[in-house]
Amino acid sequence: MAACEHEQEPKAVDSSAERRRAGDRVEAAAALIVALATIVIPALLTPDASGHGTHTQLLLLPCIFNMLTGLPCPMCGMTTSMAHMARGEVAAAFGSHLLGPPLYVAAWLGAAWALAAFVRGTPAVPEVLRRPIAPKVFLATIAVAWVGNVVIWLLR
């Protein structure tokens, strides 16, 4: 009887590992879809000449923060920046949003990583991005870029 129990135990472990790999593949597929959308959608848009507002081509409302304050919100110009990057216009992309070019490159790297994770059945989100400090670093980066974007905005 003990021999039968011992033989069944690896199957339970295999089943758990298979479920984890299936979950990792779902995560990888979702990450791949998001990364590809970040790459493809800006390529379909025409960058707004003002440096912001390209998102309205996606039937989104104009920035209310900008309308009320006359200043850019933390994400003002991001879609325009991505649209410039899709065309290889790096200087114009940085002029629209300081984080646009690095995030566009990160989308390409993320797509490659997610595809590899999907094939291997491993997690799509690297361990370093799962650490509790990661969201704080991301928000701090957005805050610093926002200050830079406001300065650029005021110098126009």
Image (cartoon, helix red, strand yellow):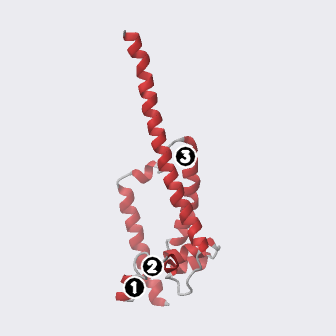
Crowd around label 3: few <14 · some 14–19 · many ≥20 (10 Å): many
Q: Residues within 10 Å of mark 1 (few under 14, many from 20)?
A: few
| Residue where numbered disc 1 is placed | 66
Residue 28, image x, y percentages: 51, 49
Query: Mark 2 is on which residue type?
Result: Cys
What amino acid type should be assigned to the residue bearing mark 1?
Asn
Q: Nearer the viewer, residue 116 or 14?
A: 14
Residue 126 location, x and y as percent? 47, 50
Q: Which mark is residue 122?
A: none
Residue 138 to residue 122: above or below:
below
What kind of residue is marked 3? Answer: Phe
Vertical side of 75 occupied by 136: above or below: above
Task: Tell me whether circle 1 and circle 2 mark residues in contact (CB < 8 Å).
Answer: yes
Which residue: 45% across, 33% down? 17
Write the residue at 58% across / 65% down: 39
Q: Which residue is mark 2?
A: 76
Dot 2 falls on a residue whose secondary structure is: loop
For this orientation, the residue located farthest to the top is 1
Which residue is denoted by mark 3 in the rendering?
118
Indicate left or right for 70 with 94 as reference: left
